[in-house]
Image (cartoon, rainbow, N blue to C red):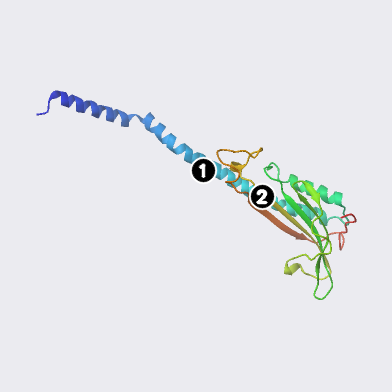
């Protein structure tokens, strides 16, 4: 037969078990501790994805805006081109984790048979430094639909190596437990072709 002491011992264990499972505060704390890391990861992934999409759209707008401003000019100079590219980079704000590169190429499609596609002049900006792009007189490439004899084109290439916030730090040091070498930059870019609006060509005297 089971003694009274055994009954009391079993009752005590049962009472503790019931008390543990009925303590909702403890269960809620455990659930919270398990769920919070997952929620934080989902939050940061969603935030990063939305920032990347918005930045990609801005990179496209840089190219279209720069091309649009240039093709409205009957003539242009290096100073004008540099100022336009500087305006274009401001479109990316408040993103500032990496610098964009912009290349402007003026292209002549000759009247030869078959027509030749040649660089008339060029200008580029890489890491905030302005310089000459493709050499004048060299062969350029354009889509087949734009290879029309006797035409003049402005091509703008805008590119950006998007740096995710998880792997970026102003001093290139470790950030949020991850090093920049583990998080690769995402290449974003767009190319726009436009024709002059106010003249047949857009000469650049000092390019």
- Residue at point 51%, 43% (across, down): 42
For the N terminus, the image quarter is top left
Distance from disc 1 to disc 2, alpha carbons, whole Å, reads 24 Å
- Residue at point 41%, 36% (across, down): 31
Q: Please state the total of marks drawn on the protein image.
A: 2
* Tag 1 and tag 2, C-beta contact below 8 Å: no
Indicate the position of residue 159 as horizontal and vertical percent values.
70, 53
Indicate the position of residue 165 as horizontal and vertical percent values.
61, 42
Q: Residue 93 sits in which quadrant? A: top right
Mark sitting on residue 67: none
Please tell me how crowded label 1 is: few (under 14), some (14-19), or many (20+) other residues with Cα within 10 Å: few
Decide if residue 131 is on the left or right side of residue 60: right
Q: Nearer the viewer, residue 204 or 90?
A: 204
Judging by the rendered image, the residue that carries numbered circle 1 is 42
Indicate the position of residue 154 as horizontal and vertical percent values.
80, 59
Judging by the rendered image, the residue that carries numbered circle 2 is 161
Decide if residue 64 is on the left or right side of residue 174: right
Under circle 2, the secondary element is strand
Tell which circle, 1 or 2, labels the residue nearer the N-terminal end. Answer: 1
- Residue at point 16%, 23% (across, down): 5
Under circle 1, the secondary element is helix
Decide if residue 189 is on the left or right side of residue 70: left
Q: Residue 176 sits in which quadrant? A: top right
Indicate the position of residue 160 as horizontal and vertical percent values.
69, 50
């Amino acid at each position: 037969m089971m003694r009274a002491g055994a009954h009391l011992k079993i009752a005590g264990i049962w009472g503790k078990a019931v008390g543990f499972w009925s303590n909702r505060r403890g269960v809620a704390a455990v659930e919270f501790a398990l769920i919070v890391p997952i929620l934080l990861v989902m939050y940061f992934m969603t935030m990063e994805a939305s920032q990347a999409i918005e930045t990609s759209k801005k990179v496209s707008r840089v190219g279209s805006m720069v091309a649009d401003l240039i093709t409205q000019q009957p003539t242009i100079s290096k100073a004008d081109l540099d100022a336009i590219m500087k305006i274009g980079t401001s479109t990316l704000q408040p993103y500032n984790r990496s610098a964009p590169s912009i290349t402007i190429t003026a292209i002549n499609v000759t009247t030869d048979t078959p027509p030749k596609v040649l660089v008339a002049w060029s200008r580029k900006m890489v890491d905030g430094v302005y310089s000459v792009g493709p050499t004048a007189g060299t062969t350029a490439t354009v889509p087949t639909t734009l290879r029309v004899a006797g035409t003049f084109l402005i091509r703008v290439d805008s590119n950006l190596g998007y740096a995710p916030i998880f792997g970026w730090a102003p001093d290139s040091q470790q950030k949020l437990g991850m090093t920049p070498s583990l998080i690769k930059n995402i290449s974003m870019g767009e190319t726009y072709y436009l024709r002059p609006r106010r003249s047949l060509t857009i000469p650049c005297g000092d390019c």
